[in-house]
Amino acid sequence: MMQLIDGLTTALSFYAAYVIWKMFRNEVNIGAPIVVRETLIYLILFFSIIWVFILDYHQAYSYQRFTSIRKEISIIAKTSFLGCLLFVFMHFLARYSYVPRAYVIFLWGTNFTLLALDKIILFHIAKIIRSLGKNKKNILVVGTMTRAKDFIEIVQKNLGWGLNIIGILSTERERVGDLISGISVIGSNEDIELILHENQIDEVMICISTERFDQVKNVLIVCEREGLQVRLNTDFFGVMNKKVRVDQIYSLKIISFINVPDDELKLFVKRGMDIIISFILLVILSPLLFLIAMAVKVSSRGPVLYRWNVIGMNKKYFRSWKFRTMVRNADALKAALEPKNEMNGPVFKMKSDPRVTKLGKALRKTSLDELPQLWSVLKGDMSLVGPRPAGSHELLRYESWQRRKLCIKPGITCLWQVSGRNKIKNFEDWVRLDLEYIDNWSLSLDIKILLKTIVTVFQRTGC
């Protein structure tokens, strides 16, 4: 039903965008019917189906009990953007007809708005229905410790989830009859088969800690045998909370802990953004790059570019460049300045570094010294957005947890750049921002950081 509603809503957005586009061009007479060719109707229906597939890919129709409006809107934003890109791309390949840019903009706006309204309305309807006792799922909770108690209390506060906890199983038979947050312990783990036969249960929620995992083996076996959905709320995976995937390889069951971004489609789009944006900037800014190069050459002795060996993704070395902002023998003078380092950790940072030239201070203030790194982005060694690049001498002083920042490509800008990098004095805080980016990476986050970076550059708040 949801797929049908989304498909019809998308079809409506195509038509609504067409009407708005016609009005924008003053081609609509008020009250006059708007005729759409039959071939276009079939095309709209085709793309409406494509839209549903994209929504399904983003797991819009997966388990809906624990969803939220924010999550639904995020899925819709990704779907509308990707769908419109696909719409334009397929038209370009098929050479079906010319697609006006204004129409594509109106299509994205109307599709996002209508689908968002669709989801908000359905979300609240489902919440009201479930609050009235309809569309409920009967849940059996396994566990009596803090984890189980917390889960029960959260469910009781979120009636819109439509979860009805009918009872609790305990590992200790003597606890049968006890009440936990108002829910009765109706049996021990050994009673699982009998309880399933005597009660109408839709799902089993196991809430246990690692050390008690062996005590629910029988529960898992019985639920699997009887085809009952089981969900696990546990610290079994410890701090490895990014993503877990289970693969069946011949007779082997392989559990993969995904600690880095692994969505191939999104990574493909990210790489596409890197190539397009870096290429355009290198072309547009080429006169500025030439002027800066001439200014560096004239202002002080030494090469125009500072060449440095950087450690990239998975600890692979590559060579990158910046405009030189220091005197020619800056690296040789660094050892004498180490006692004045203002950064705690392996990175050297000094506010009034005597090695920095007058021009270099201006370039650093505006971050213009970073522009040659666009070539590294175009080559694929770096990304526009990513953790701060690491020098080979710095890596030797990294702690174990700090090395995780090397699991993705380094970037020209990241959270550290837009969070006041000139105010960060502790290297650990710098790395935590990089890890926060890795753990929460998304295309929308990249776009947000890029936009904030532009603001930061114009505010001249760089180092």
Image (spheres, grey):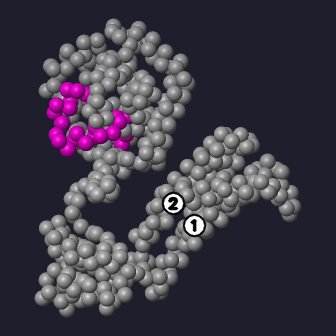
Residue at left 50%, top 24%? 282
Q: Residue at label 1?
A: 3
Residue 387 image position (x, y, % from top left): 33, 38
Between 402 and 341, the one nearer to me in the picture:
402
In this rendering, would 199 be left or right of 445? left
Secondary-structure class at tag 2: helix
Secondary-structure class at tag 1: helix
CA separation in Å, label 2 and label 1: 9 Å
Between 253 and 419, the one nearer to me in the picture:
253
**Hey, what amino acid is under mark 2?**
Asp
Q: In terms of image quadrants, where is residue 327?
A: top left
Residue 396 forms part of the magenta stretch: yes
**Label 2 environment density (alpha carbons within 10 Å; few <14, some 14–19, many ≥20):** some
**Hey, what amino acid is under mark 1?**
Gln
In this rendering, would 444 be left or right of 100? left
Question: Magenta region: which residues?
Answer: 388-415
Residue 326 makes an appearance in the image: yes
Q: Are marks 2 and 1 in contact (CB under 8 Å)?
A: yes
Residue at left 33%, top 9%? 302
Q: In terms of image quadrants, where is residue 203?
A: bottom left
Residue 241 makes an appearance in the image: no
Between 414 and 187, the one nearer to me in the picture:
187
Residue 122 forms part of the magenta stretch: no
In this rendering, would 450 be left or right of 339? right
- Of callouts 2 and 1, the N-terminal one: 1
Label at residue 299: none
Residue at left 33%, top 39%? 408
Position of residue 231 relative to residue 97, above or below, is below
Residue 258 image position (x, y, % from top left): 31, 51
**Label 1 environment density (alpha carbons within 10 Å; few <14, some 14–19, many ≥20):** some
Q: Residue at label 2?
A: 56
Position of residue 339 relative to residue 256, above or below, is above
